[in-house]
Image: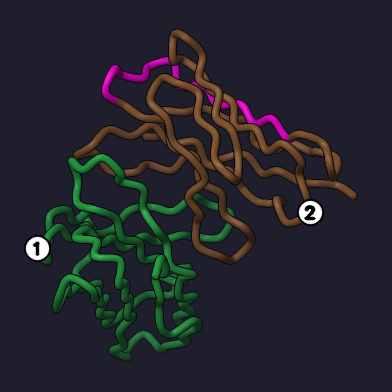
Chain colours: A green, B brown
Amino acid sequence: DTEVTQTPKHLVMGMTNKKSLKCEQHMGHRAMYWYKQKAKKPPELMFVYSYEKLSINESVPSRFSPECPNSSLLNLHLHALQPEDSALYLCASSHASGTERNEQFFGPGTRLTVL
Amino acid sequence: DAKTTQPPSMDCAEGRAANLPCNHSTISGNEYVYWYRQIHSQGPQYIIHGLKNNETNEMASLIITEDRKSSTLILPHATLRDTAVYYCIVYAYGQNFVFGPGTRLSVLP
C-alpha cells in the first residue's frame, strides 16, 4: 500500500466552527507532514511529526492544532479560522529523516473553504 | 527560500521528449535533487531523485551536470496526462522540502 489518504476531500466551515482534517498511511513511515497550498502557489510546510512527536512548527497560528495519535494517523484540528485560511491542505509521509530513501508521498489533499 | 530556479512555463508537443531544466548553483555536496509534479488539484507526486549520477526510472530520466549546478528532467514521450506543474527541490537529510514556484508544463496535442 503506497497511498496516503485524506478525509474529507472538501470542507466548508464558518469562522466559529471546529473541524478536523484526517490523514492516514500504512507504509510504515515514521515522519508525517502537513502542508498548506494557496491557489497557484507551491505547497508550504506547516508541521512535521517524527516518531509521533512534533518536530517542526513553521510558525503556524494556534488556530491550527496538529495531533499524531499513532504512527499511521495525523490529524489537523481547526478552530476559529479566517477566510484567508481557505486553501488546499496536503498531508505527506516519508521514512524518518536520515534513511536512504526519504521521498515524501502526498495525499490528494482537503480543499478547505472558510466562510 | 527555495534553492532552485526553473522557467515558469514550457510547452511540449505530445509524443516528443519534454526537457525541464533546473538551476541549483548553490547546491551543497550532501544535497540531493528531487523532482515532483502536481497535476491540477491533486497532491504532488514523486518522480525521481539523484545525487550526482544520472538516474532513470519508469517515469523519467534525471541528468545532473558534472558540477551539479544544474539538472534536467526528461520525460521521454510526453502525453497529455503529463501536463502539470513540475517542482525541482534541493534536499539534504534532516532538512525540509522547500517548494519553489516550479515549471508549468503544457503538453499540446
For image coordinates 72% across by 36% down, the residue present is B76
For image coordinates 15% across by 57% down, the residue present is A50
For image coordinates 23% across by 73% down, the residue present is A72
Residue furthest to the right in view is: B109
Q: In this view, does B39 lie to the left or right of A80?
A: right
Indicate the quadrant containing the N terminus of chain B: top left, top right, bottom left or bottom right. Answer: top left
**Residue A53, numbered label:** 1
Residue type at tag 2: Leu
Which numbered disc, 1 or 2, marks the residue closer to the eye? 2
Give the x, y percent position of residue B45: 51, 54
**What chain does mark 2 sit on?**
B
**Magenta segment:** B18-30
Give the x, y percent position of residue B75: 68, 38
**Residue B17, numbered label:** none
Q: Which residue is disc 2 drawn over?
A: B80
Residue A71 in the magenta stretch? The answer is no
Give SS at disc 1.
strand
**What chain does mark 1 sit on?**
A
